[in-house]
Amino acid sequence: MKAQRFICNKMAGKNVRAVGGINGALGRRLEKAGFGCADKLSCKVKKMTKRNFMRYMLKTAGGNVRHAMDSYVSVTNHCRQVKDCKCGRRR
């Protein structure tokens, strides 16, 4: 449900906690790491492979694999459907 609401609207200005798979505690940790907006997280997803993004999420936010995978899927689906990701291409 949360991921569906996230996909419906533009990503600009959304808090990182709006991303599917990221709850309050993970959101606070990501905000401390400098990822307060979902835009910044989408840039990370676009520039990293799936495996590297999941490792990064586990290390930075301290969540589990399910949270990392849900957030990856949520952001990639949003970028595909809404097409408002303004970052560079994946390496």
Image: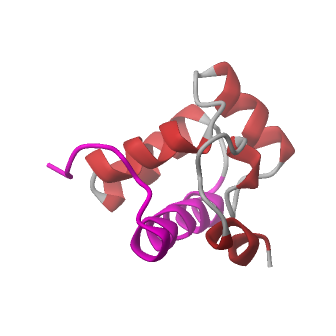
- Indicate how the structure is coloured in the image: secondary structure
Which image quadrant for residue 79? Answer: bottom left
In-front residue for pair 76/57: 76
The magenta region covers 64-91
Q: Is residue 83 magenta?
A: yes
Q: Is residue 56 above or below residue 23?
A: above
Q: Is residue 13 above or below residue 82?
A: above
Residue placed furthest toward the right: 24
Left or right of 23 on screen, residue 57: left
Q: Position of residue 18 (x, y in %)?
A: 74, 54
Q: Is residue 58 magenta?
A: no
Q: Main secondary structure of the magenta part?
A: helix
Q: Is residue 31 above or below residue 39?
A: above
Residue placed furthest toward the left: 91
| Residue at figure coordinates x 36%, y 46% from the top left | 86
Q: Position of residue 90 (x, y in %)?
A: 20, 52
